[in-house]
Amino acid sequence: MRTFDYWDLKNRMWDNEIVSYLSKIHECKGRQELYLRQKPAELERLIEIAKVQSTEASNRIEGIITTNARLKQLVEDKTTPRNRDEMEILGYRNVLNLVHENYWYIPVEPSYILQLHRDLLRFTNLSYGGRFKTTPNEIDMTLPTGERTVLFRPLEPYETPGAVEALCRTYREALEKEWADPLILIPCFILDFLCIHPFHDGNGRMSRLLTLLMLYQNGYLVGQYISIEKAIADTKDSYYDALARADQNWHEAQNDPTPFIKYMLGVLLSCYREFEDRVDLAEKTGAKSTAYDVVRHYAMEKLGKFTKQEVLMACPRVGASSAENALKRLAEEGVIEKLGAGRKTCYVRSAVQKI
């Protein structure tokens, strides 16, 4: 049976890239508290945006989708699910809210992981929510030829409960005894969790919820304001590539987690940078700035094309109608150019600015 012991991480020498990631993320964490005190109103709006993005992105990775309008209504609890996809989206929303609001009270232990999984699938008619798998599962893909190929064979069902218990135990011990930085331990835990693949369904979504849970418990709160799940979904190919390279020889406990650690650290750092950019934008435009001023500042700093939705995400205190009016005025003034129409509408900063 596969064993789990993070003691080996204590004396591991990490390369310069990982050391640099750790240093930069630690610096971001040090500035985090200052940012959180500066703009409470804007931060509340960022939380709302991140919840919608996280719910959409984490489910999209698994092929679970609905329309943007329906998604927003589901996240805001303004409608009921119409189909299985929406039932699973609603379950993710509920567990995400639970993690956001109660992370200190959810230990990383098998019984709590089972309860989170139960709640993830609560609105579906599936009978295995909150239970470990009872039949073997495989991680596979379909080739362009239509042929199915197995990428990874997880642990057998009879091994799963003991493996999850051992994994949680070594993680807690490593944290308590400081065998490694939490930012190293968390990707290692998630990699092992995914290789165990303890559930019939929902393993990917559970891994992302557990990532948030453990980050929050260790003081890295950026996922509440910037969607880590969206950052993963937007780099899905890199995510799967890092997993594939990190799980080689996993069953023999000879795998190297470095590719997955680097990937997750890169995602986390990018989220912190986006968080700081958004708070800085609010700071630069000032409390007395109009919606037009805020959107103009965003447009002047933006390289390449952007949409109204991106404006709303970057400028959380600007409402949808105000953003639309500001974009229309900026286009009329020649500050930006409008491209496309309808749902394909986007904008780009004009090459020649009118004063």
Image (spheres, grey):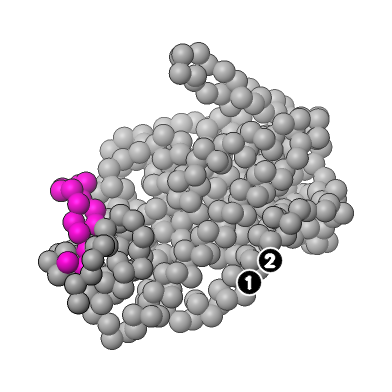
Helix, strand or loop status at disc 1: helix
Q: Quick check: 90 above or below 338?
A: above
Left or right of residue 283: residue 291: left
Q: Quadrant of the C terminus?
A: bottom left
Mark 2 Cα within 10 Å, few/some/many (few <14, many 20+)?
few
C-alpha distance separating marks 1 and 2:
6 Å
What is the span of residues highlighted in magenta in the rendered image? 334-347
Q: Amino acid at mark 1?
A: Glu
Indicate the quadrant where residue 284 lies.
bottom left
Q: Quick check: 117 above or below 99?
A: above
User: Which residue is tagged 2?
Assistant: 23
Q: Quick check: 54 above or below 225?
A: above
Indicate the quadrant where residue 134 lies.
top right
Q: Nearer the viewer, residue 207 or 198?
A: 207
Tell whether position 338 is magenta. Answer: yes
Which residue in the rendered view is the most extreme toward the front? 352
User: Which residue is tagged 1?
Assistant: 27
Q: Position of residue 257 (x, y in %)?
A: 72, 43
Q: Position of residue 181 (x, y in %)?
A: 74, 60
- At 60% across and 20% down in the image, what residue appears? 150
Tally of marks? 2
- At 67% across and 28% down in the image, what residue appears? 154
Helix, strand or loop status at disc 2: helix
